[in-house]
Image: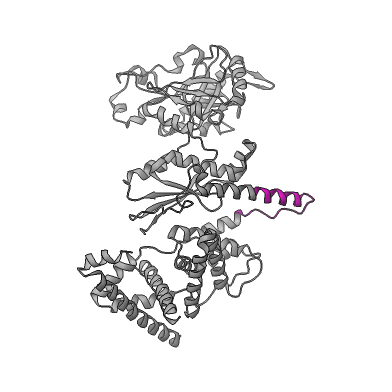
Amino acid sequence: MRADEERIGDEVFAARVALGLRELDGVEHAPDVSDEVSRRLALAEPRAARSPWRWLTAVAALLAIAVTTAVLVQHNRGGGDGGTAEAQGQDPIGPSGAVRLVYELPAEELQRAVARKAGQDAESLIAETVACLQRRVGELAKVTRGEGNTVIVMFDLKRPKEDLGRVEALIGADADLEMRIVASDDYVNGSVRFRLKRERERLNAWLAVPGNKELLYDNPRNIRRFNDDEADGPVAFGKLAWYPHLILPAAGGDRWEPPYSYVQMLASATVKAYDDAEYADGVSEAVRARPQNKRYLIELLAINMDERHFTGKDLDPAGTSVDRAGVLSFRIIDALAGDYADWSEKYLGRCSAIVFNGVVKSAPRFESRIPGRGVIHGLWGEDAAAFAKLLSMPLAVQPELQSRTMVGPR
Amino acid sequence: MPRVQLATQGSTSADAGAFVREHQTAVWRYLRLLGADPATADDLLQETFLRFLRRPGPHPDSGAILRTIARGLWIDRHRWLQRRRVVQWAEHVDEALARAVDPDQDLWLDALHACRDKLAARARCALDLAYRDGLGRQQVADQLGLSPNTVRNLLAQTREVLRQCIEKRVRECEGGA
């Protein structure tokens, strides 16, 4: 008995020595969680007011917990999609140590996603997001559910360091796709109507302000500064917005691709953010000296924000593919295919704008009623495959990186 | 050592921050000693404070309550079949800490630091390799050019020397305090 106590005492002592040495030598140390705890305390939801419905709410909550538990039990038995290493008793930290990325799924975004996806609760959305992130990063890292609304990504340091950048890019990548109608003078919806000549004048005045054009070339999405300016932005503020279209070097590299201002259907909705000489002289040496992803001229296309539109979340992930030429084919989910067909029919002969991450990629003209399928041209080389991959693995909620810490080897 | 006593109801964010900073290292060390890996300890550390700070009323012995919450969270992390082992180990840890004059382990850590410096070079090297770096007996033996059995005996002797040294220093500090 005494020998047992001594052995146990020795084991505890050895454990204390091991941890003590690691702390003394700076291998690991206690994190400072004070800010995070204060933040989470401040975010804590107020207690629900007492109401006759509270018992009903409690029963519903218990049922939800029971269902979630059942799902988790199934998940732990290996039935879940993208089962986590921790849940399956595997150690995600290799002998080389790991980098631990903690992402948060913002509560407000989760609530919005729950409202959008009837029949799904926050728990199932988080589980779906974890599984989707695991599919995105594949073998590069292990994705697990963290506490609350957090997701933990463990990157084993035995992998090349550059893979960590790939993991972060894959997780942070947001394939934000919008399909909208290009604004036109004849659009009328109650009191909403557009005067494109006045809109162009307003935007040209903004571009003439020193620094604004540079701002745009620094990041084309900075056009939102104009769009969000109620005083000096679009005349039809909130109903019309300008989106950048990048004119790229044509094949061969000496000339530019044709701009939208050359397309009769689009000319009145387009404003150039470059001088005519810049276009006419072709791709200059100065442009060639820029990084490849900065070699472009910018023009801006007026988009009707009042009319219905479709987004990447309306696409069927299984129906998204890309061919060798970089043409991305998509299919609208069955529930909205009829709406999309009606929408395309309403605008027969007009142009829609396909916008990826805030930049117009193409502006195809509706030639016929489209029964929920389409193609997107104008993607940059490998981007097409990357976009297709992201669209086939859409995230209901975009995670936000909260912390990046090194975890010592076991 | 002064302790921040927090009445959680009506406490401000600044109070909470100061309270967390005061106790977080001790709770984290405790979680690590229970067997939580660093990442899990980080997670449970936050959760421990959130649970504590959401409880009403003042807490005269915050450290003990924090350890109780942390221990509960750590045990909850394990499936039923693993819990017996986890609970047993937690009991051993608690017994060891109950005998310690400073459950936060600051004194103990200072003593470890001083006592390690007094060890013979070979003993210290073996200690660092085996405990700090987590190498197995064979690996330590390879690095030191010793047999595994010699390493086992060397580590046992070193632990004993270290234990006596630490206890002596902690007693002295206790007496001097």
Q: Is residue A264 visible?
A: yes
Q: How far from the left and from the top, in percent, is residue A205?
A: 50, 26
Point out the residue furthest to the bottom here: B175
Where is residue A175 shown, x and y percent of the image? 48, 33
Left or right of A122? Residue B102 is left
Identify the residue at the far front of this view.
A1
Which quarter shows the C terminus of chain A? bottom left
Q: Residue furthest right?
A: A52
Give A165 or B137, whichever is nearer the viewer.
B137
Quarter of the rendering containing residue A297: top left
How was the colour assigned to the protein in this rendering?
one colour
Does the rendering let one see residue A34? no
Which residue is painted at 38% across and 83% down in the image? B169
Q: Which residues are magenta?
A: A43-65
Q: Is B57 placed left or right of A50 in the picture?
A: left
Where residue A265 sits in the image (x, y, percent)? Answer: 51, 13
Location of the N terminus of chain A by quadrant is bottom left
Q: Is residue A168 above or below residue A229?
A: below
Question: Which residue is rendered at x = 24% and y = 75% of the image?
Answer: B121
